[in-house]
């Protein structure tokens, strides 16, 4: 699909908000490379030199990125064609794709429903067949949640495997960039191209170069794998149809030779409040630079309701007199969740389970209670709180709406997670 075809086709979906109209990105990319046959979109919170990078917000409506994010320069050097920047919830705060200043994105796989978020445009562009793959960012599920709702593959790597340099932060200690694609093989290929140590990102890991060969090493294999399923998952899935799809997926994995092991995550329900307290504090601090002097508008003057809520709560919690009450407690709970997950993962190769507890709501249903929106994240935030790799593969449909199986591994077990995903994809 060329640029003008894409523009026309996307009028109904609104997945891409900035196009490479002047061929700026196209002319600066390599002609050869592993990804030279692929068209990609990157989420609009990753800097692409010379293009508007607004992060879905009016705050940055005039922000032309002066440099490439590391993932973008890696895509260019591997020959990928970047078609444009994908729509997203404002500053990646959201789970529906509805909070973008550029308007909501449609779900091509379930028309009339939200595509999920916050990497709404990335998942929708892949699901609609506009691009072969896209990059998303995942702070609490923003790659996996839209991948599940749109019926595509999404992967969030171990924290530090992909550089965050040039990514507009939501919450630094949780944010991770990863691929969205129609199949695990393409996702692994894109991940292989964008991952690696980056001296420009102080949290980037320096690992053996062999670690990053996700595509070359991909082995779809389930026989003999020990896969954990937590009984607490069942209590938190609120949709009976999703529960059925996940049960069926577990049966399929077992028939393919995997051993399903019961594990326990008693503090799973604590993950959601822990996540939001961490996000409020980190997001508040990340947004202090948007004071209207250097970058566009003062954020509080122009942002949407959810972004403002996070700034206000973050500022409140960050006050010295409350630090022991909220933030320190949230950090303690974060350690507890990390410990619990790592204990559960010690006896298995990976955990398998649901991605989202409920089906995507209808676009425009105007959800006013933030807790209703936050509830989408219950199964995805634990991986971010613990820095773990986690991916999603399409598992089936409920009332015609896709839902995905989530596979989660221990830190640095990215290859195991991808292999299990690839194995499941073939069933
Ligand atoms: N829905 C979560 C939030 O609103 C996750 C967002 C994300 O992963 N960027 O914070």
Image: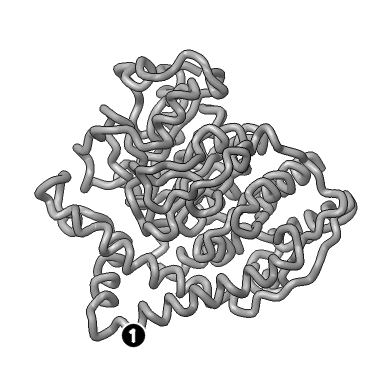
Q: Where residue 117 appears, x then y in whole percent? A: 47, 51
Residue 254 seen in this snapshot? yes
Q: Quadrant of residue 312?
A: bottom left
Q: Could one spot residue 401 in this view of the protein?
A: no
Between residues 133 and 101, which one lies in front from this camera angle?
133
Q: Residue furthest left?
A: 293
Q: Is residue 260 left or right of residue 210?
A: right
Residue at x-position 55% and y-position 40%: 180
Q: Residue at x 42, y 42 (%)?
A: 198
Quadrant location of the C terminus in the rendered image: top right
Residue 94: image location, x then y, percent: 41, 56
Query: What's the coloring here?
Result: one colour
In the displayed structure, 340 sits above or below 367; it is: below
Helix, strand or loop status at disc 1:
loop
User: Can you tell which quarter of the image residue 283 is in?
Assistant: bottom left
Residue 327 x %, y %: 36, 77
Q: Is mark 1 within 8 Å of ligand 1?
A: no
Residue located 19% across and 54% down the image: 289
Judge whether 108 appears above or below 206 on screen: above
Residue 234 placement (x, y as % from top left): 70, 71
Give me the residue at 43% from left, 49% from top: 97
Image vertical order of residue 361 relative to residue 279, above or below: above
In the depicted view, which residue is nearer to us: 407 or 415?
415
Q: Which residue is tagged 1?
A: 324
> Badge 1: few (under 14), some or many (20 or more) residues near its Cα, within 10 Å?
few
**Along the viewing direction, whichever of 324 and 2 lies nearer the viewer:** 324
């Amino acid at each position: 699909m060329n640029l003008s075809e894409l523009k026309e086709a996307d009028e109904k979906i609104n997945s891409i908000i900035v196009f490479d109209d002047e061929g700026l990105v196209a002319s600066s990319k390599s002609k050869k490379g592993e990804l030279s046959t692929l068209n990609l979109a990157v989420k609009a919170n990753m800097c692409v030199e010379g293009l508007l990078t607004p992060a879905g917000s009016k705050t940055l409506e005039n922000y032309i990125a002066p440099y490439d994010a590391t993932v973008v320069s890696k895509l260019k050097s591997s020959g990928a064609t970047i078609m444009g920047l994908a729509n997203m919830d404002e500053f990646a705060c959201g789970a529906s794709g509805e909070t973008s200043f550029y308007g909501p994105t449609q779900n091509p796989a379930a028309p009339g429903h939200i595509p999920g978020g916050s990497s709404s445009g990335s998942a929708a562009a892949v699901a609609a067949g506009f691009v072969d793959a896209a990059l998303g960012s995942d702070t609490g599920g923003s790659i996996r949640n839209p991948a599940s709702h749109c019926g595509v593959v999404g992967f969030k790597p171990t924290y530090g495997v992909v550089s965050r340099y040039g990514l507009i932060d939501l919450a630094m200690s949780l944010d991770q960039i990863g691929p969205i694609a129609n199949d695990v093989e393409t996702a692994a290929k894109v991940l292989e191209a964008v991952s690696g140590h980056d001296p420009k990102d102080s949290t980037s890991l320096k690992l053996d170069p062999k670690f990053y060969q996700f595509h070359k090493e991909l082995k779809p294999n389930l026989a003999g794998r020990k896969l954990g399923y937590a009984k607490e998952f069942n209590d938190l899935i609120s949709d009976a149809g999703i529960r059925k799809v996940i049960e069926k997926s577990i049966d399929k994995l077992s028939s393919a030779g995997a051993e399903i092991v019961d594990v326990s995550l008693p503090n799973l329900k604590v993950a959601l409040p822990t996540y939001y307290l961490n996000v409020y504090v980190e997001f508040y601090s990340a947004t202090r630079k948007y004071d209207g002097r250097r970058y566009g508008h003062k954020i509080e003057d122009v942002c949407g309701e959810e972004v403002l809520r996070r700034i206000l709560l973050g500022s409140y919690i960050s006050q010295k007199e409350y630090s022991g009450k909220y933030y320190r407690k949230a950090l303690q709970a974060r350690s507890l969740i990390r410990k619990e997950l790592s204990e559960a993962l010690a006896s298995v190769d990976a955990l398998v389970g649901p991605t989202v507890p409920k089906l995507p709501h209808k676009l425009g249903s105007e959800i006013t209670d933030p807790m209703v929106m936050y509830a989408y994240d219950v199964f995805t935030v634990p991986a971010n709180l613990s820095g773990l790799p986690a991916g999603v593969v399409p598992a089936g449909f409920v009332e015609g709406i896709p839902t995905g199986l989530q596979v989660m591994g221990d830190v640095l077990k990215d290859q195991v997670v991808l292999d299990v995903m690839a194995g499941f994809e073939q069933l």
